[in-house]
Amino acid sequence: MQAVGRGFRRALLLALCALLFTSPLAARTVSGLYNASVPVKDRSPAERSRAAAAALGQVLVKLTGNRAAAGDASARPLLSRASTLLLQYGYANASDGGLLLNARFDEHVLDRELSERGVVTWGHQRPDTVVFLVSDAEDGRQLIGGDAPGALGETLLRKADTRALPLVLPMLDLEESARLNAAQDWEALATGAGELGVRYGAPAVLVGQLHAANEGVWEARWRLTIDGDALDWQDEGDLGEALVEAAVDALGDALARRYAEPALLGGAERVSMTVVGLRGAEDYARLSNYLESLDTITDLFLRSVDNQRVLYEATARGGRAGLAQAIGFGRVLAPVPGQVDTWELKP
């Protein structure tokens, strides 16, 4: 490490000690990846074994982003002995009066087993998606927002949790409410909501409109925009909640294709990265804590530091592209235009 000023070095040591007592400033970090809840008939060992396999199947979908992960040949041996991978489990009453098995699997053991089988996992850092959802029925238009999500919003959030997708529901302030209510056709609604979504700074915006059609049939239109690329589709069914669940699955599949591609995340490379804009020891502590929280980085080495600039070498899953993707999900670092592998610490 190059020489640094005595005062800065002392403050740096104090800040590093403070890391032990502060929570990490992560990017958008998803929790509960190794947890799942499944219904059970009773508390018998046989039923627990069956439910553990079902729970592990849900966890594999969360970890990989792949809805078919539980049916993959590499996963079948794990499912057959899912009970042995449990870290803890318990029972709880379901909202419908039934019984649930709450399962938590051993993160380190499961990660090792998946790695040995060549199964690539997505990681904890995932992109936000802002969801603008409206429901048009005979009694008028309903806007689904964060403060009062209603039945459709609760379905949306619950389904997103099973796919480990971080969602943001809009604030529905005066501007948002007025613009969404004023949209008289699908294109106006999708365009207007997409423009409103920019204020949230999320990589993805999902816009949905449910319309009560004839004889109890619901029609749905959706537009998903990821980093400027748009995808439109339509659906219909008897239940609006089922259409919302299907849309979340489509969202999860699209995000996984873009951000959890095994060809990208399957390898690891040694990369250098420079971070500028540090104004003192507190900034250095915040930066170190943040980088340590990124599971894309498997090894981090500090090469040099001064009052404004830090140089690291890191082993990153997916190499430079994988590291840039993980950092891009958060709001801690911004790329410096025209400078390769250089990032600026945001205030």
Image (spheres, helix red, strand yellow):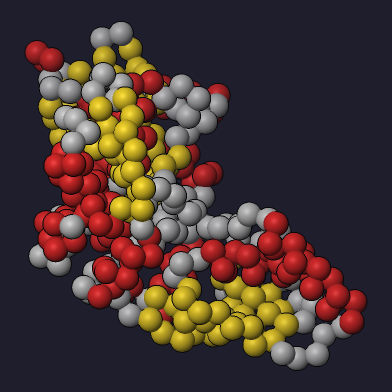
Residue 4 in the image: above or below residue 156: below
In percent of width and height, residue 60 lies at: 25, 56
- With respect to residue 149, does 312 lie above or below? below
Quick one: 152 or 316, which is closer to the camera? 316
| Residue lying farthest to the front in this orientation | 45
Asked where in the image residue 174 lies, by quadrant, the reply is top right
Quadrant of the drawing holding the N terminus: bottom right
Q: Residue at x 79, y 77 (%)?
A: 307
Q: Residue at x 90, y 76 (%)?
A: 7
Residue 8 rendering spot, x and y as whole percentages: 85, 76
Residue 277: image x %, image y %?
Answer: 72, 71
Q: Toward the viewer: 321 or 29?
A: 29
From what the image shows, is residue 286 above or below residue 129?
A: below
Q: Residue furthest top?
A: 139
Figure quadrant of the C terminus: bottom right
User: What percent of the width, then of the height, locates residue 139?
Assistant: 30, 8
Residue 228 in view (yes/no): no
Is residue 211 depicted above or below 201 in this figure?
A: above
